[in-house]
C-alpha cells in the first residue's frame, strides 16, 4: 500500500546524471503551495498530466480547489473510474480515432482500460486509491454564460461585499476598479484607463456610492443609475458637465445591450459566485469546482476571470490567517491574463492574490505553455516552479531570465540551462524555495482518464457521472420600459457567396454532421465574432428587410502559424516574428504559395474548441482530408519560412553597433552618431595632447631664447658703453702724450660686435620658434578636423545585414484544418453566405 504520509505523490525521482527514473517517490509538501506554484511546459510535455496529478493529490488530502479551464483539459478531473472497466471508458474514447485505427469503440475502450490498469499498477496505485479520490471531494463543472454545465450567476459580483467598507477602502476600490474594467471590456471598451476614462470613473463612483452604504447593485440598477447618477458632482464638476446626459445614455445603452440579449440570460441564472459554497458542500465536504470557459469570447473570459479572482479575494479577506494550505486556485493557462507590460482587468486581482494569499493559506497554481509573455516580476512571488520540456530556445532563454530575476540568490543559470535542455516528455524540473537543491522527476500515471479537451456538449454527461444535482438559481428579469438592445458592430474582409436553396432546413448549405479530420491533424474553430449586419456592411452588401438568419456554415481552410525566433549575440539580436497563412482552398496536390495567403496574427485564445451549436459544415476535400498531405504541407510551410524569411539588422561594422527591426533608422543613426562623437572626442584628445607636448616644448625654448635675447641686449648696451669709454681714453692719451694700448680699444669693439651678433641670432631663433609654434597649431587644427570628418563618415557608414532563422528556432504553433464560420442568410428562396469571422 502506498504511504505518502500526507504528502503529494507526484512521481518518481530522476537521476540528473543518467536521466534514468529511480524507484524513489517524489513527495511534495502541500503546505509549500501556500507560497504558490508555476507550471511551465510546451504542448506534449506532460504539463496537463502533472497538474491533474497535483489536483488529485489535493482532493485526496481534503484540500478544496477552484479551477479555471480555458481549453477543456481539466474537465478530465471528473473521469476517475475505480473499477477500471472498459464500459467506464467507452463513452469518452475518441470514436473517430478508433475508426481510423480500424477498431470498434468497444475494442478501443478495452485497450484503454487495460492501458490504465497497467499504468496505474506500475506506479503502485490501486483501485482503492481511485475510490478514495472519488469519495474525497465533490467534483463539478460550471459553465459561465451557458447552461451546458452548472450555470453561474454574476449578480453576486455586483452585490456589496460582506467586509466593512471603512476598514477595507483600498481593497474594495481595487475590486471595484477591476470589476468596472472587466464590465466595460465586455461591452467592447478595451484598454480603459481607470484614471482618465470617464466611463470608468462614473461607474466606479456608482459602485462606491452603493457599497459604502452596504447597498447591493444589479445590472438593471447600474444601468438606471448610469442615466441618473445618485450624486451631483464628480470631482469639482457637476455630473452633466463631466459626463453629459446624452453620452451617459449611450453608455447605458451599451450596458443594456448585454442585459437585453437572450444569450446573456445564462449569465444571470444559476449559482452565485459564493466562494465559500464553491469550496465546500453544506455538510463540509471539500469541492473541486471547475469553471469551463472554452466556449466564451476573449472579452467574456476576461470578464469572468476578473470577477472570480475578485470574489476569491473578498472571501479570503474575511478568513483568519493560516500557515497551512486551506484552498487551491488553479488556472490552466495564464497567457494574456498576467502579461509583462499590459494591464488587463485580471492582472491586478491576480497580482494581489500572489502577494497576499499566502497569509490566508490560499495557494495559487498557475500554468502556461507560453513562458515568453508572462510577468516574471509577479511570478517572483511563487515558491515552487515545475518546469517541463520547452518548445524553443527563446522560451528557455526567457524562462531563465525570469528565474534569474525572481531568485533572491543562489541561482546557477548554467546548471538550470543544462537541466532544462535535457528534459524529456513527462520529466519535470522542480525548483522549490523550501528545498536546498532542484529535483528532476517523472510524473506518475494520472488516476483520471486523460481523454483530452472535452466539448461543451459532453459536459452534462460528465456532471451526471460525478452525481452533480441542480443548484439554486438567481434570475434577473428585464422589466418593460427599460432600455432596448442594439446590435454591436464587428468587421470582416472575406467575400460572400450566393447559394440558391429552398426554404426548408434540409436544403440548407452544408451538412449537419462535421466531417472527421484525418489522422492526427489538428482542428480549430475560428470564433463567430461578426454579427450578420456588420458582416454585410464589411462585404459591401445591403441586407433587405425580409432577410432572415438561417444558421452558421463552417467552411474548412488550412491554417498555418509559426513563431520564428531570431537570436544573434554578435548583432545584439533577440527578436520574434510570427508568420500566419490562411489558405481557403488549397491546391488538391498540396502545393501552396504561402506568400499569397499571408494573414494577420491569430490569437490562439480566440479559437473555439468546439463549433457553435447547430452549425453546419462543408465537406472536407483534398488535400485537407489526407493526413500525409497535411503533414507534407506543414513541412513545406516550415521550409518556406526557413528559405524565404529574413530580417534586416542595421549595422555599423566600424563602430560594432547593430540594431534589430525593433529599432528605427532614426534611433540607430543617433546611436551611431553618439558613438562616432565619443570615438572622435577620444582620438582628438590623444592627438591634441601630442601636439600640446610639442608646442609646450617649443614655447619653453621660445621663453628661454627671449630671456637670452634680453641678456644679449643688456650685454650689448654694456659693451657699447665700455667701447665709448675706451675710445675716449685713447684720444685723451694722444693729446696728453700718454700712451694707451690700441689693442684694448680693438678688443672692446670686437666684444660689442659679438654682443650685437648674439642679439640678431636670438631674434632669428625667436622668429623661428614662433613660426614653428604657429605651424604646429595650424597642423593640430587640421588634424583634429580630419579626425572629426573621419568619424562623422564612419558614423554615417550604415548598412544592413540580412539574417535568416535557424531551423531549430522555427516553431509551428498552429497547423491544421480551421473551420471558418459564415452566416447563412435566407432571402426569399435564396441563401447567401457572409463571413462571420474577422481577426481582431
Image (tube, rainbow, N blue to C red):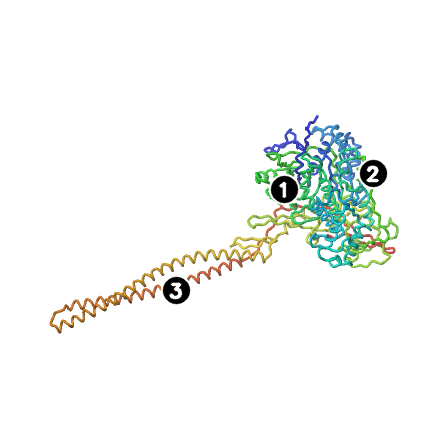
Earlier-in-chain disc, 3 versus 1: 1
Q: Residue at left 44%, top 56%?
A: 686
Residue beneath label 1, please?
380
**Residue 774 numbered tag:** 3
**Residue situated furthest bottom in the rendering:** 735
Earlier-in-chain disc, 3 versus 2: 2
Q: Residue 247 or 341: which is nearer the viewer?
A: 247
How many C-alpha atoms fall within 10 Å of the one at disc 3: few (<14), some, or many (≥20)? few
The quadrant of the image that shows the N terminus is top right
- What is the quadrant of residue 331 in the picture? top right
Q: Secondary structure at mark 1?
A: loop
How many C-alpha atoms fall within 10 Å of the one at disc 1: few (<14), some, or many (≥20)? many
Distance from label 1 to label 2 (Cα)?
41 Å
Earlier-in-chain disc, 1 versus 2: 1
Q: Is residue 14 visible?
A: yes
Q: x and y percent of residue 275 in the render? A: 75, 40
**Residue 470 numbered tag:** 2
The mark lying in front, picked from 3 and 1, is: 1
Amino acid at each position: 500500500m502506498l504511504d505518502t504520509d500526507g504528502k503529494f505523490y507526484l512521481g518518481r525521482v530522476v537521476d540528473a546524471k543518467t536521466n534514468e527514473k529511480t524507484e524513489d517517490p517524489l513527495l511534495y509538501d502541500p503546505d509549500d503551495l501556500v507560497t504558490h506554484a508555476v507550471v511551465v511546459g510546451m504542448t506534449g510535455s506532460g504539463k496537463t498530466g502533472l497538474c491533474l496529478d497535483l489536483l488529485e493529490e489535493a482532493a485526496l488530502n481534503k484540500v478544496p480547489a477552484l479551477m479555471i479551464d480555458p481549453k477543456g483539459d481539466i474537465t478530465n478531473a471528473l473521469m476517475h473510474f475505480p473499477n477500471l472497466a472498459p464500459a467506464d471508458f467507452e463513452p469518452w474514447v475518441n470514436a473517430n480515432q478508433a475508426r481510423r485505427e480500424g477498431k470498434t469503440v468497444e475494442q478501443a475502450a478495452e485497450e484503454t482500460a487495460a492501458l490504465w490498469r497497467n499504468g496505474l499498477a506500475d506506479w503502485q496505485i490501486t483501485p482503492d486509491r481511485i475510490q478514495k479520490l472519488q469519495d474525497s471531494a465533490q467534483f463539478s463543472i460550471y459553465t459561465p454564460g451557458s447552461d451546458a454545465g452548472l450555470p453561474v450567476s454574476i449578480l453576486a459580483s455586483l452585490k456589496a461585499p460582506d467586509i466593512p467598507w471603512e476598514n477595507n477602502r483600498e481593497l474594495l476600490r481595487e475590486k471595484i476598479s477591476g470589476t468596472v474594467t472587466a464590465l466595460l471590456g465586455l461591452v467592447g471598451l478595451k484598454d480603459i484607463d481607470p484614471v482618465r476614462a470617464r466611463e470608468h470613473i462614473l461607474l466606479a463612483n456608482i459602485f462606491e456610492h452603493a457599497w459604502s452604504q452596504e447597498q447591493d447593485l444589479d445590472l438593471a440598477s447600474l444601468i438606471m443609475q448610469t442615466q441618473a447618477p445618485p450624486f451631483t458632482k464628480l470631482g469639482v464638476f457637476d455630473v452633466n458637465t463631466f459626463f453629459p446626459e446624452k453620452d451617459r445614455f449611450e453608455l447605458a445603452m451599451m450596458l443594456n445591450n448585454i442585459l437585453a440579449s437572450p444569450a446573456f440570460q445564462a449569465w444571470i441564472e444559476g449559482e452565485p459566485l459564493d466562494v465559500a459554497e464553491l469550496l465546500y458542500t453544506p455538510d463540509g465536504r471539500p469541492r473541486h469546482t471547475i469553471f469551463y470557459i472554452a466556449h466564451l469570447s476573449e472579452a467574456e473570459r476576461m470578464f469572468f476571470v476578473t470577477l472570480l479572482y475578485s470574489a476569491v479575494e473578498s472571501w479570503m479577506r474575511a478568513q483568519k490567517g493560516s500557515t497551512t494550505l486551506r484552498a487551491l486556485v488553479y488556472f490552466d493557462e495564464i497567457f494574456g491574463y498576467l502579461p509583462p507590460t499590459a494591464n488587463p482587468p485580471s492582472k491586478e486581482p491576480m497580482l494581489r492574490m500572489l502577494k497576499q494569499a499566502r497569509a490566508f493559506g490560499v495557494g495559487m497554481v498557475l500554468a502556461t505553455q507560453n513562458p515568453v509573455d508572462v510577468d516574471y516580476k509577479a511570478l517572483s512571488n511563487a515558491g515552487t516552479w515545475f518546469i517541463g520540456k520547452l518548445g524553443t530556445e527563446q522560451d528557455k532563454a526567457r524562462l531563465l531570465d525570469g528565474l534569474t530575476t525572481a531568485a533572491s540568490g543562489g541561482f546557477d543559470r548554467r546548471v538550470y540551462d543544462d537541466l532544462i535542455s535535457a528534459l524529456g516528455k513527462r520529466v519535470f524540473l522542480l525548483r522549490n524555495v523550501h528545498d536546498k537543491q532542484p529535483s528532476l522527476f517523472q510524473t506518475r500515471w494520472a488516476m483520471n482518464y486523460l481523454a483530452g479537451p472535452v466539448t461543451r456538449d459532453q459536459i452534462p454527461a460528465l456532471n451526471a457521472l460525478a452525481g452533480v444535482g441542480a443548484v439554486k438559481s438567481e434570475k434577473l428579469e428585464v422589466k418593460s420600459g427599460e432600455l432596448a438592445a442594439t446590435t454591436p458592430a464587428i468587421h470582416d474582409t472575406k467575400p460572400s457567396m450566393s447559394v440558391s436553396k429552398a426554404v426548408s432546413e434540409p436544403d440548407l448549405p452544408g451538412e449537419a454532421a462535421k466531417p472527421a479530420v484525418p489522422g492526427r491533424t489538428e482542428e480549430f474553430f475560428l470564433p463567430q465574432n461578426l454579427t450578420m449586419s456588420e458582416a454585410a456592411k464589411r462585404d459591401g452588401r445591403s441586407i433587405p428587410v425580409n432577410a432572415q438568419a438561417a444558421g452558421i456554415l463552417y467552411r474548412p481552410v488550412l491554417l498555418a502559424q509559426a513563431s520564428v525566433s531570431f537570436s544573434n549575440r554578435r548583432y545584439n539580436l533577440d527578436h520574434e516574428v510570427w508568420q500566419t497563412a490562411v489558405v481557403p482552398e488549397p491546391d488538391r496536390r498540396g502545393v501552396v504559395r504561402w506568400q499569397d495567403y499571408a494573414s494577420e496574427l491569430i490569437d490562439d485564445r480566440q479559437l473555439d474548441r468546439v463549433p457553435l451549436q447547430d452549425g453546419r459544415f462543408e465537406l472536407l476535400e483534398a488535400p485537407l482530408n489526407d493526413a500525409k498531405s497535411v503533414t507534407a504541407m506543414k513541412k513545406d510551410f516550415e521550409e518556406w519560412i526557413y528559405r524565404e524569411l529574413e530580417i534586416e539588422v542595421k549595422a555599423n561594422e566600424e563602430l560594432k553597433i547593430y540594431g534589430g527591426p525593433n529599432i528605427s533608422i532614426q534611433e540607430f543613426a543617433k546611436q551611431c552618431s553618439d558613438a562616432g562623437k565619443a570615438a572622435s572626442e577620444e582620438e582628438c584628445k590623444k592627438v591634441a595632447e601630442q601636439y600640446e607636448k610639442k608646442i609646450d616644448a617649443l614655447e619653453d625654448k621660445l621663453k628661454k631664447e627671449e630671456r637670452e635675447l634680453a641678456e644679449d641686449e643688456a650685454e650689448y648696451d654694456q659693451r657699447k658703453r665700455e667701447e665709448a669709454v675706451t675710445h675716449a681714453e685713447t684720444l685723451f692719451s694722444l693729446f696728453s702724450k700718454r700712451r694707451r694700448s690700441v689693442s684694448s680699444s680693438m678688443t672692446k669693439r670686437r666684444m660689442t660686435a659679438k654682443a650685437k651678433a648674439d642679439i640678431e641670432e636670438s631674434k632669428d631663433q625667436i622668429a623661428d620658434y614662433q613660426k614653428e609654434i604657429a605651424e604646429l597649431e595650424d597642423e593640430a587644427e587640421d588634424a583634429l578636423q580630419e579626425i572629426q570628418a573621419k568619424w562623422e563618415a564612419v558614423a554615417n557608414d550604415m548598412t544592413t545585414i540580412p539574417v535568416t532563422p535557424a531551423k531549430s528556432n522555427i516553431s509551428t504553433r498552429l497547423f491544421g484544418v480551421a473551420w471558418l464560420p459564415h452566416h447563412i442568410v435566407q432571402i426569399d428562396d435564396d441563401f447567401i453566405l457572409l463571413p462571420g469571422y474577422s481577426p481582431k
